[in-house]
Amino acid sequence: MTEMYLHPGKRLGSRYQLESLVGTGQFGQVWRAKRLHPPSDMPVALKLPLDPQRGEAVLMADGQHMIDLPSHAGIVAVHWQGRVGSLWVVEMEFVNGSPLSHLMEDETRWSKVTFIDIIRWFEGVAEALAFLHQHGIAHGDLKPDNLLFDEPSRCLKITDFGTSRRLTDNLIRTTRHAGAWAYQAPEIQQANQRGAISDLFSVGAVMYHAVTGRLPRASIQALLTSAPITRPRQFNPAIPPALDDLVMQLLVDDPARRLPSARELQRQLQIMLAQEHLPRLPIPQPPPPGTGHLDRAAVLLAQGKLEEARTAAAEATLHSTGLIPALELYAKLSDQLGYTDEAILAFKRILTLDSVSEETRRAVETYLADLYLRLHRYEDAEAYIERALLIQPVPKAIAFKAVIVLGACTKLERALELLEALEFAHPKDGAVLEKKAWILWLLHRYEDAARVARDVLEIMPDNEICLRRLIDYETLMGNARRAEHYQRQLALSEQPIS
């Protein structure tokens, strides 16, 4: 079989017409489609293999346990699977919404989510999971990508049953070790066994991620060593204690000591929903002057206690998402201490706030550009530095930083354009001229680079970069004596001062 080119409007035999691509996974694509035969006005979702030779077996597994399952509001129904022409097709219910993972990444939408929302969503997931287990099916790969948020019902629906297995015992050994490790139970990772009790751990991991913004075990080392899991309330004290306890009951490593069933999970969540005073996500309120977390962070920072200062700054951001200095301090300390992902998220959060001044916005964009440059994520670095340049007038320090970022991103002509503007404003600035010589050299404009390098030496006679460029240039031009002259000057500049 050969790969087939799929596109909107394409017909699959006389049965379907593709309308739009919904998503792409490792083995297949999901398309919204119109069913032509038998005809239907309701759209359907089709799973199709990217490469029939690799993905077909995976798609067959996805629907094999689900076709005969009675319908359930919390489970994406599999209507049919079979071959249409040369393609193996899985026809499913079309859900008008995105995965929970996308919702969690959308800061604007997620900022409106409350603990009541989260508890209600997972009460529905628990009910659907209990239904699956009752019918002898373990899902095996519950994660935010496999929970679709249905916009009309405002509920989560379980989908993607490629690793599902029939329950013939409490735990089942499987030959296919699939799924997202961050959400998998230890018995899957260590013994490649999965079952109903493993699904409960996965639900707990997803709930933990939803209420804290973190994974229970966020590194391969932590997963392999079954490192202790920090209680959710230590990251977000606003989490209701009962919810904190429930999540930790789900995340017990020993299956025999874990919360016993999805029905019990549903029951406990229903009790929480019945409480009248269930707290919502914290409303942004700045702490009182002199007593807040930000003041404590400043004291700890002055004492050189960086980790403690970062924790205090994090607490300040929990109590007031609009407290820009706290977010900025938290982001910078996170970067300094090696928590790069947290730093990026915090800086991006600042940029979403309406109250950010242009000066702060540009400073954050410049910092992000520098951070991405250090991570060798050049396209991201370029995008943020270009945004910083949009705010006029551009300070010299920002323009100079932009030159460095753009040069590293091989945007040499753009970097040279900025340098020439800087040179016009600061004609005798040795640092500007040095960078101009560097960019001209990278552009293979060797004669121009040498001319500018000589100008630099009139201002900074010991400039190593320009001396090396001139040595290279004179050697290239066959001027051995001039090359030797600059070589001696370089040697003198490198001698230690006694």
Image (cartoon, grey):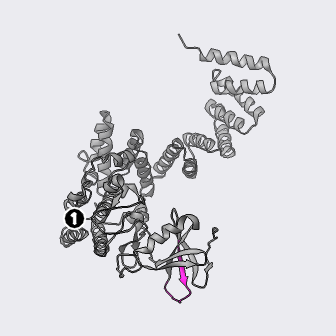
Question: Hey, which quadrant is residue 478 in on the image?
Answer: top right
Residue 216 in picture, x, y percent from top left: 32, 53
Would you say residue 156 is visible in this rendering?
yes
Residue 123 in picture, x, y percent from top left: 27, 71
Would you place residue 185 above or below residue 313 in this image? Answer: below
Give the residue displayed 61% in from the left and 45% down from the top: 409
211 left or right, relative to 480: left
Q: Residue furthest right?
A: 478
488 left or right, relative to 474: left
Residue 144 in picture, x, y percent from top left: 39, 63
Q: Amino acid at mark 1?
A: Pro
**Magenta residues?**
30-42
Q: Which residue is mark 1?
A: 260
Q: Residue furthest bottom?
A: 39
180 left or right, relative to 36: left
Give the residue displayed 64% in from the left and 70% down from the top: 5
Residue 51 in picture, x, y percent from top left: 58, 65
